[in-house]
Image (spheres, rainbow, N blue to C red):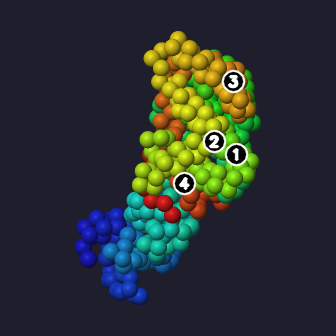
């Protein structure tokens, strides 16, 4: 085997090919290191040989055949610093049983396959591939840069499988998650304020939901930043209330047919009208449920109208629009809608602040979608740091695959 092939296929340079053999369907390549040893500690060349240790390294497979490199690694005694160590292996990191080329290949696979698939293809454990990915993520995304932050969103997230909450901070300009805090509410953000101060960032606006906890935290730590109750968060809250209303109506319904029609409409109510699947008669089923239930219909159409609040030409028009909207539920006789209108009335300032920045929450919505995909995978929950790193890397990730 030529030296050039060793180098281009597996990144091995400075070693001599001895022989190759097939063992259990895999290729085993024996290498030898030429002399010219150095001390691994101080790099001195004044060393004496102290025997060899045979080490085996997995490297990039050929097709589905695994390839193992076998190298007797020289041990040397250094005459300068006195250390007795194995000399450095150029093509593998210290203490790793695979080559750097293998590591790069595993990372490439992780982009298009699940850890499990990558591990199966490479013939290594799930943990080995996860460790490779984790070390890479730590190196590249371990310390999010906060200095340039200007417009951020704060969001709380429920991790269903573990029953715990996390709070994330998103850079609305780049779409990157820049902080992941334990729990929800102001407490979860304390480490973030500290890092933000150290970075010297100037935050102009913060988008968030209408719960008082985050607003109070921002008022205390970023007194000059504008608070914005954005489209995404307001509609999300409305949808939660709408789901509750549907559930109550379902339980109150005495008529069997009535119940039948309401059943399974939860997702239809939350879908945007343009996304309804006509093949499944979703529009018709939704219409039936709305016709039978006046309160539900009122709420549904009010939500559609509320979405228009973020599409007004200017702040003054938007202010009129909001006032009109707030007045309508007050006479609707539906308690949930009245409460919601009151909430909006008391948050008027933060709602209208949108028109001072016009920030788009598309990135926030996209991030939420990606997090749900990430959550639907099995990993991440056992290792908090790994999950956080995955979140930091999310804006650069395409999750086409699930499972
Ligand atoms: Zn030395």
Quadrant for residue 213, please give it: top right
On the picture, is 38 further left or further right than 368?
left
**Gap in angstroms between the C-alphas marked 4 and 2:** 37 Å
**Gap in angstroms between the C-alphas marked 2 and 1:** 8 Å
Q: Is there a contact, CB below 8 Å, between mark 2 and mark 1?
A: yes
Q: Is there a contact, CB below 8 Å, between mark 3 and mark 1?
A: no
**Mark 4 Cα shell of 10 Å, populated few (<14), some (14-19), many (≥20):** many
Q: Mark 3 highlights which residue?
A: 330
Residue 249's disc number: 1
Residue at 49 percent across and 41 percent down: it is: 272
Q: What element carries label 1?
A: helix
Say if residue 361 shows up in the picture. Answer: yes
On the picture, is 333 further left or further right than 400?
right
Say if residue 398 shows up in the picture. Answer: no
Q: Mark 2 highlights which residue?
A: 293
Q: Mark 4 highlights which residue?
A: 374
């Amino acid at each position: 085997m030529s030296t050039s092939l060793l180098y281009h296929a597996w990144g091995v340079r400075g070693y001599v090919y001895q022989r190759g053999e097939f063992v259990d369907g895999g290729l085993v390549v024996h290498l030898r290191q030429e002399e010219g040893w150095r001390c691994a500690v101080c790099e001195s060349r004044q060393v004496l040989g102290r025997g060899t240790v045979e080490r085996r390294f997995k490297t990039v497979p050929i097709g589905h055949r695994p390839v193992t490199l076998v190298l007797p690694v020289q041990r040397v005694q250094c005459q300068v610093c006195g250390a007795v160590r194995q000399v450095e292996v150029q093509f593998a990191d210290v203490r790793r049983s695979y080559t750097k080329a293998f590591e790069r290949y595993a990372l490439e696979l992780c982009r298009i396959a699940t850890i499990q698939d990558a591990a199966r293809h490479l013939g290594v454990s799930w943990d080995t591939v996860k460790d490779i990915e984790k070390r890479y993520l730590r190196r590249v995304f371990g310390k999010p840069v906060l200095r340039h932050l200007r417009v951020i969103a704060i969001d709380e997230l429920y991790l269903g499988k573990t029953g715990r909450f996390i709070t994330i901070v998103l850079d609305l300009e780049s779409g990157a998650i820049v902080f992941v805090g334990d729990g929800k509410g102001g407490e979860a953000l304390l480490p973030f304020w500290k890092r933000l101060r150290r970075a010297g960032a100037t935050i102009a606006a913060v988008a968030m939901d209408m719960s008082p906890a985050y607003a109070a935290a921002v008022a205390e730590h970023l007194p000059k930043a504008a608070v914005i109750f954005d489209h995404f968060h307001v509609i999300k809250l409305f949808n939660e209330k709408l789901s509750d209303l549907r559930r109550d109506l379902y339980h109150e319904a005495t008529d069997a047919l009535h119940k039948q029609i309401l059943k399974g409409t939860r997702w239809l109510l939350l879908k945007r009208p343009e996304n309804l699947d006509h093949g499944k008669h979703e529009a018709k089923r939704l219409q039936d449920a709305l016709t039978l239930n006046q309160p539900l219909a009122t709420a549904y159409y009010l939500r559609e109208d509320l979405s228009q609040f973020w599409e007004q030409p200017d702040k003054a028009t938007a202010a009129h629009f909001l006032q009109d909207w707030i007045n309508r539920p007050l006479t609707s006789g539906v308690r949930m809608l009245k409460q919601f209108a009151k909430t909006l009335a008391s948050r008027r300032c933060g709602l209208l602040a949108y028109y001072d920045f016009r920030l788009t929450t598309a990135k926030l919505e996209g991030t939420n979608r990606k997090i749900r995909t990430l959550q639907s995978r099995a990993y991440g929950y056992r290792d908090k740091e790994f999950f956080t790193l995955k979140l930091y890397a999310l804006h650069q990730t395409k999750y086409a695959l699930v499972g």
